[in-house]
């Protein structure tokens, strides 16, 4: 049985479908990338999983339990965390305070003492490359550092599944390589399953075991990255969206 299963999942805003009859299963420990042109429904799909949006149809099951329709605080307690496209860090707190909050309020955080939470915050900050920034105010971080701080906060709650929404957009080559290593670490060291929306194809090719392509809210193709990205219908979808340079 897959860890996460989406069956005929749909989301309409007004009359328009953003997500339309999606069936996807994700195995425990897998790194699955979700790609597709702008507006294809990728962010909406992640929000449906984590309970930030309610599906208008279909069922989402996590670890054998139905989670669709449940609010995000319930879903996160079951072990699903999300790093959104726009970082949601607390700007007036320090980097370490932000990471520690995740360790206090995350999924299995019950019973952790403050010093344990701090130790966890420090360890996770090192993994995301912010190990020398503990005392900095969040206001002094740039966009990608804020994204990685949000990732640290999510990881500190020790989720079983993490949803990442374009965390690699706009990185330079060195930052991109470091980020790819980081996602590998998340998976290998913590055994966390990763569902990851990404436009940066170089990263998708290096990291994803399987790729799902969304177009107009529907699954257009699915399979290993090299096969899927050579698929004619996928190439056309990107060309049609004028998005090929972005890919
Ligand atoms: N809260 C909302 N209200 C109305 N329409 C929405 C809402 N959120 C998303 N949409 C619409 O749903 C569709 C899918 O949006 P979504 O943000 O999921 O796309 P995406 O694949 O993440 O795009 P991008 O690559 O640009 O991030 C778009 O047409 C968008 O305008
Ligand atoms: Mg998006």
Image (spheres, grey):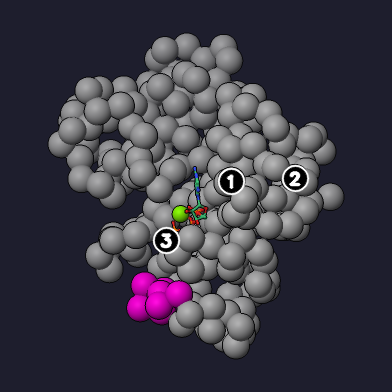
As measured in the structure, the alpha-carbon distance from the residue carrying label 3 to the one carrying label 2 is 34 Å
Instruction: State left or right for residue 99 relative to residue 190.
Output: left
Q: Is residue 196 magenta?
A: no
Q: Is mark 1 within 8 Å of ligand 1?
A: yes
Please report contact status of discs 3 and 1: CB closer than 8 Å, yes or no: no
Q: Is mark 3 within 8 Å of ligand 1?
A: no
Residue found 75% across the figure and 45% down from its top: 57
Figure disc tally: 3
- Res 103 visible: yes
As measured in the structure, the alpha-carbon distance from the residue carrying label 3 to the one carrying label 1 is 38 Å
**Dot 3 crowding, Cα within 10 Å, few <14, some 14–19, many 20+:** some
Dominant SS of magenta comes to loop
In this view, the residue in front, 146 or 19, is 19
Residue found 66% across the figure and 64% down from its top: 218
Q: Is residue 244 magenta?
A: yes
| Disc 1: which residue | 14
Tell me which label, 3 or 2, sits earlier in the chain: 2
**Dot 1 crowding, Cα within 10 Å, few <14, some 14–19, many 20+:** few
Residue found 72% across the figure and 50% down from its top: 9
Q: Nearer the viewer, mark 3 or mark 2?
A: 2
- Magenta residues span 241-247
| Disc 3: which residue | 180
| Disc 2: which residue | 57
Q: Helix or strand or loop: what does disc 2 sit on?
A: strand
Locate residue 51, reporting x and y percent.
61, 34
Locate residue 95, reporting x and y percent.
27, 30
Vertical relation: 112 (above or below) 187: above
Locate residue 134, reporting x and y percent.
24, 30
């Amino acid at each position: 049985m897959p860890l996460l299963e989406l069956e005929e999942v749909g989301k309409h805003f007004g009359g328009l479908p953003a997500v339309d009859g999606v069936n996807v299963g994700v195995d425990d420990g897998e790194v699955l990338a979700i790609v597709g042109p702008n507006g294809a429904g990728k962010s909406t799909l992640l929000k449906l999983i984590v309970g930030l949006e309610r599906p208008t149809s279909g069922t989402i099951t996590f670890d054998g339990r139905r989670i669709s329709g449940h609010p995000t605080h319930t879903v996160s307690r079951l072990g699903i965390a999300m790093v959104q496209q726009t970082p949601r860090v607390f700007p007036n707190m320090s980097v370490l305070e932000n990471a520690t909050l995740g360790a206090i309020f995350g999924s299995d955080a019950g019973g952790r003492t403050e010093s344990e939470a701090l130790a966890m915050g420090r360890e996770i900050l090192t993994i995301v490359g912010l190990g020398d920034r503990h005392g900095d105010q969040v206001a002094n971080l740039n966009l990608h550092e804020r994204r990685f701080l949000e990732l640290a906060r999510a990881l500190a709650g020790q989720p079983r599944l993490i949803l990442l929404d374009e965390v690699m957009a706009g990185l330079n080559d060195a930052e991109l390589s470091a980020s790819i290593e980081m996602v590998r670490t998340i998976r290998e060291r913590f055994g966390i399953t990763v569902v990851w929306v990404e436009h940066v194809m170089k990263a998708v090719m290096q990291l994803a075991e399987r790729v799902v392509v969304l177009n107009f809210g529907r699954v257009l193709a699915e399979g290993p990255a090299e096969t899927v990205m050579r698929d004619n219908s996928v190439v056309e979808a990107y060309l049609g969206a004028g998005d090929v340079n972005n890919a």
